């Protein structure tokens, strides 16, 4: 088989096509090489920027870590399940070592002794007073807990409160001097009559009763003064609510002997026990009952003591009367120390009521209108532990308490 010889023209055409193709490949290769160079430069720049960003984040993390360690307050980072995932040295000093992985609530309860009479304040076993605050982690589950040592602030506040009470005592002594001097003079006068041999037994008994009445009045003035100035700590325990109400009715019974005023006790709470200081709470209720009785002394009437549970863990104690009520201009000031609408009042009774109720972690409010009686509502927690401490899941928890400080 023979192969025909190519013509010079076909060879020339093939060579030209080969040259064109070679030039095209060279250009493509050059463009590809340039593109690879650009991509390499971009990759190097991106890598450099990434390294720079990582280094900056590392520097920022180090600064934040140093800042966290330098903070005087304890910081706990808590995950969505309530476990401690991070903390600083101050938190370890306050709550103890090896906090990582432990439930924050258990760690806090183990370190706490009592709760202060201020929102979200706790006293640790070493005597340190701390405030507790919460912040979310944004979109991430969990919280940041901040424990701030407020011992010095609390001490300064207590000292300031004490000075205020002493100053108030001075004002009170001056304002009550005539109130004590007058019944004292009356008691001395009747005592002088008791020495008269011509008195009949009935007259002697009458004068003795007058002396006793005036002395009891002065005793109440002194007791109010001491209760207001001391404002000490109230030791609490588990007490029986039905027994407290029965004792209240029994102690108040002599004041109802003339039959003009009647007492009705209606326990609708269904609660058997609560945590409180029985003597202080009884004194508060007796104070309100005495105020109601004195308000209805002329026209008589009914005093109602009612209990109910309107919210979980909250007891409402109400003392209502159908007396003349409280004028609107006085209603906003009735809990102020030394404010009184009675000529022989000290103005301390309701101030002490407010203090004792707040010391139990509750609040007192008054509903009244002139001519339509008055009703005092005491809202008390059944257990005055800091139930306001939130959990990461939004639940409620508590820290045991044995003492509740009472302050103005």
Image: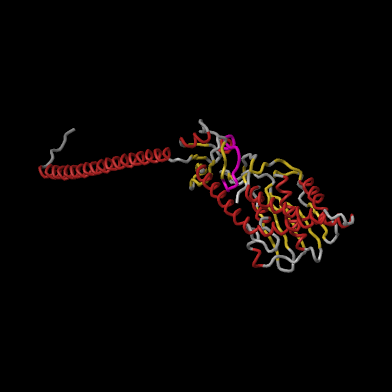
Front-most of residues 288 and 141: 288
Q: Quick one: which residue is furthest to the left in this view?
A: 8
Which residues are the magenta region? 108-120
Front-most of residues 54 and 288: 288
Q: Is residue 80 left or right of residue 280?
A: left
Circle count: 0
Dividing the picture into quarters, in which one does residue 373 lie? bottom right
Q: Residue at 64% x, 48% y: name it.
A: 359
Q: Residue at 64% x, 40% y: name it.
A: 401
Question: Does residue 177 appear anywhere in the picture?
Answer: yes
Percent x, y for residue 200? 89, 56
Q: Is residue 109 magenta?
A: yes
Percent x, y for residue 323? 76, 64
Q: Quadrant of the N terminus?
A: top left
Front-most of residues 108 and 2: 108
Percent x, y for residue 102? 55, 34
Q: Is residue 236 left or right of residue 82?
A: right
Dividing the picture into quarters, in which one does residue 59 lie? top left
Q: Eyeballing the image, is 190 above or below 81? A: below
Q: Is residue 36 left or right of residue 402?
A: left
Q: Residue at 69% x, 51% y: name it.
A: 222
Percent x, y for residue 285? 73, 52
Q: Is residue 280 magenta?
A: no
- Display coloring: secondary structure
């Amino acid at each position: 088989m023979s192969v025909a010889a190519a013509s010079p023209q076909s060879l020339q055409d093939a060579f030209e096509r080969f040259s064109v193709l070679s030039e095209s490949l060279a250009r493509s290769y050059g463009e590809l090489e340039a593109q690879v160079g650009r991509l390499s430069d971009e990759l190097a720049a991106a890598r450099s920027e990434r390294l720079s960003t990582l280094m900056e984040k590392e520097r920022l993390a180090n600064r934040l870590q140093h800042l966290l360690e330098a903070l005087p307050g304890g910081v706990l980072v808590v995950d969505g399940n309530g476990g401690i995932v991070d903390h600083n040295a101050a938190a370890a000093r306050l709550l103890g070592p090896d906090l990582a992985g432990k439930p924050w609530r258990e760690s806090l309860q183990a370190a706490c002794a009592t709760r202060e009479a201020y929102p979200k304040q706790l006293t640790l076993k070493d005597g340190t007073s701390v405030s507790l605050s919460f912040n979310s982690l944004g979109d991430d589950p969990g919280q940041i807990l901040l424990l701030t040592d407020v011992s010095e602030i609390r001490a300064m506040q207590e000292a300031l409160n004490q000075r205020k009470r002493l100053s108030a005592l001075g004002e009170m002594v001056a304002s009550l001097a005539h109130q004590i001097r007058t019944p004292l003079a009356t008691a001395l006068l009747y005592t002088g009559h008791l020495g008269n041999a011509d008195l009949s037994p009935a007259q002697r008994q009458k004068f003795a009763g007058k002396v006793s009445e005036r002395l009891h009045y002065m005793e109440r003035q002194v007791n109010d003064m001491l209760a207001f100035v001391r404002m000490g700590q109230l030791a609490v325990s588990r007490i029986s609510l039905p027994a407290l109400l029965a004792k209240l009715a029994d102690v108040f019974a002599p004041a109802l002997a003339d039959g003009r005023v009647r007492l009705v006790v209606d326990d609708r709470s269904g609660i058997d026990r609560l945590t409180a200081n029985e003597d202080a709470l009884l004194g508060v209720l007796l104070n309100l009952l005495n105020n109601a009785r004195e308000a209805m002394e002329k026209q008589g009437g009914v005093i109602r003591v009612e209990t109910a549970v309107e919210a979980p863990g909250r007891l409402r104690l109400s003392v209502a009367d159908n007396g003349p009520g409280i004028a609107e201009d006085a209603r906003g000031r009735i809990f102020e120390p030394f404010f009184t609408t009675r000529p022989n009042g000290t103005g301390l009774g309701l101030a002490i009521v407010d203090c004792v109720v707040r010391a139990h972690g509750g609040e007192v409010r008054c509903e009244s209108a002139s001519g339509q009686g008055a009703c005092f509502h005491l809202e008390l927690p059944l257990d005055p532990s800091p139930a306001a401490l939130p959990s990461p899941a939004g639940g409620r928890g508590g820290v045991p308490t044995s003492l509740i400080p009472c302050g103005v």
